[in-house]
Amino acid sequence: MEHRSEKKKKARARKKKAFLFGVGLDSQDEHLRITQGPNFRLVGGSQDTHEQMQETAIKVNEELSRRGKQLEQIGPGEFLEIVQKVR
């Protein structure tokens, strides 16, 4: 049986992670586009769609940096606020 202090240690050890994953489905040129960043992966899409996803992911990270936060530190409401601001 685990003691409370052991449970607390395990809970702290499991760090909260957040990740952006973008999928574009409009590609017709059979070109596979993949972009990876520190907290995002973007796959597929036409050249235009993929570029828009890249721009949005980069701007989201820039805004998070301005706020002094990481993706895992914000909730859904703040995330939507950031996305609306950067688009």
Image: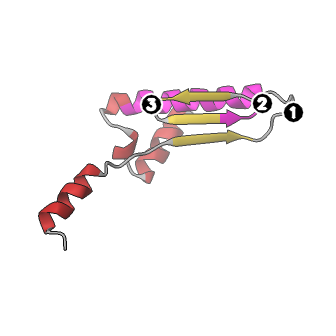
Q: Assess disc 2: are there few (<14), some (14-19) or many (≥20) residues with their C-alpha within 10 Å of its C-alpha.
A: some
Residue 16 pos. (x, y %): 35, 49
- Marks 3,2: beta carbons within 8 A: no
**Residue named by callout 2:** 46
Residue 37 pos. (x, y %): 51, 28
Q: Principal SS element in the magenta part?
A: helix
Amino acid of disc 1: Gln
**Residue named by callout 1:** 28
At x 67%, y 41%, the residue is: 23
Residue stretch in magenta: 43-64
At x 69%, y 30%, the residue is: 50
Quote the CA–CA distance across marks 2 and 1: 7 Å
The question of residue 50 being in magenta is answered with yes
Frontmost residue, 6 versus 23: 6
Residue 7 pos. (x, y %): 20, 63
Give left or right: position of 63 versus 34: left
Please tell me whether mark 3 sits on a helix, a strand or a loop.
helix
- Marks 2,1: beta carbons within 8 A: yes
Residue 2 pos. (x, y %): 18, 69
Amino acid of disc 3: Asn
Frontmost residue, 11 versus 18: 11
Quote the CA–CA distance across marks 1 and 3: 29 Å
**Residue named by callout 3:** 61
Q: Assess disc 1: are there few (<14), some (14-19) or many (≥20) residues with their C-alpha within 10 Å of its C-alpha.
A: few
At x 80%, y 38%, the residue is: 26
Q: Earlier in the sequence, mark 1 or mark 3?
A: 1
Please tell me whether mark 1 sits on a helix, a strand or a loop.
loop
Looking at the picture, does residue 31 appear above or below residue 20? above
At x 39%, y 51%, the residue is: 75
